Amino acid sequence: MRESPHDHQTHLQPQLHQLPPTPPSSSLLVYLCRLTLWLRLPLKSPCSLWSDSRTRALSVRDDEEGHLICRSGDVLQERYEIVSTLGEGTFGRVMQCIDHRRGGAHVALKIIKNVEKYKEAARLEINVLEKINEKDPDNKFLCVQMYDWFDYHGHMCISFELLALSTFDFLKENNYLPYSIGQVRHMAYQICLAVKFLHDNKLTHTDLKPENILFVNSDFTMSYNVEKKREERTVKSTAVRVVDFGSATFDHEHHSTIVSTRHYRAPEVILELGWSHPCDVWSIGCILFEYYLGFTLFQTHDNREHLAMMERILGPVPSRMIRKTRKQKYFYRGRLDWDESSSAGKYVRENCKPLRRYLLSEAEEHHQLFDLIESMLEYEPSKRLALADSLKHPFFENGGIGEAAGSKNWEGNRDISR
């Protein structure tokens, strides 16, 4: 789940299977000359030695996993000049580029692997992003903005506004020091606003997590914590954007049985009871807990253990959900089939406790945050807080909306320059 960029320099060496083929009429001497020229050929400017069906093999190359082989200085579509690699995932890579048709502005270019299933997922994501652009041309609802898309020799490419670190990566680079209550408030409001916009337009994101919430600008100040003997970062602005719509699903479309990254997966998804917009709300509740404490609420990779953690933190799974699920293997006589005395039982007991016992302060705003999280972590989807109501929650009404770092007001924070 936690993917980090990998150094791709090893992919820049010549690959033996792509040597220039020997033309039937060529002498050995001519062939060796051509081979020498090819080995000296820079990757920077796509060109070829022969203008036939073999051209692509010489000018545009993929590695064994289907990634486009490219490096700093390469230019795609006579427009996008690659600067650096921003990240890598199973789908492909995200590159920082100079867009020469946008006045030299820097953009993020998502380059999808030349693998059919990822290309099809990219086409679906483009469809969602075009709908978002149509419904929110001024980018008021804080979903990442798509600028352009194209097919580059079998690689679907999507150009986005350039953002900064994800809220997870900032947390990780800051030794998992949690965000302040004011920062949590501002980020929470923006996430609820963005995802409510999706729900209003008959979309469920289905993969909300701290990795998919990006800061617009992740510049920070440093201070020294004498007690912990370490430097600690405080992000200057908590303006964020919701990203990664590769799994977003319209209400009328087929709904996959399993969605969401494990730690942020709602109980109705685990129990295969069907899902809709409320599964996003559950994910947001998990995200806010993680921002506040600095660690994941449900740290597990097993369904039964996941349900046991839920029961330890939130109380018993409702009997109606137990009766309705096809996953009866997780239950016995209407209760979760869980051995408290096993090693897994001990792990859950030692690492999980009732939700309110995680409070870091008895101050009212902390209790308000946990009241909001509790409402988002309601087992029954029909009883779970709707995002329209979440925006009216007392947590957002009290405590000063300008508390978020680097902002006098939320609008100003939202519009901070990139």
Image (cartoon, rainbow, N blue to C red):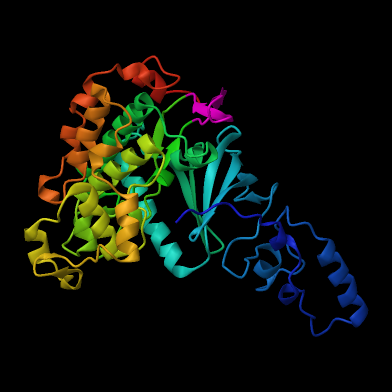
Q: Is residue 302 left or right of residue 178?
A: left
| Up-down relation of residue 314 to residue 322 (above or below) | above
Figure quadrant of residue 370: top left
Q: Where is residue 56 in the image (x, y as percent from the top left)?
A: 65, 67
| Place of residue 27 in the rendered image (x, y in percent of width and height, measured from the top left) | 89, 82
Q: Identify which residue, 260 or 127, lies in the foreground.
A: 260
* Image-quadrant location for residue 322: bottom left
Q: Could one spot residue 105 in this view of the protein? A: yes
Q: Camera-side residue: 296 or 57?
A: 296
In the rendered image, the residue lying farthest to the right is 29
Magenta run includes residue 200: no
Which stretch appears magenta?
217-236
Which is the main secondary structure of the residues drawn in magenta? Answer: strand
Q: Is 203 left, or right, of 315 in this rendering?
A: right
Q: Residue at x 73, y 64 (%)?
A: 48
Visible residue check, residue 260: no
Tell which residue pokes out farthest to the front in this image.
341
Residue farthest along the bottom direction in this orientation: 24
Find residue 30 and report its horizontal and vertical position in percent: 90, 76
The residue located at (26%, 65%) in the rendering is 304
Q: Is residue 299 toward the left or the right of residue 72 in the image?
A: left
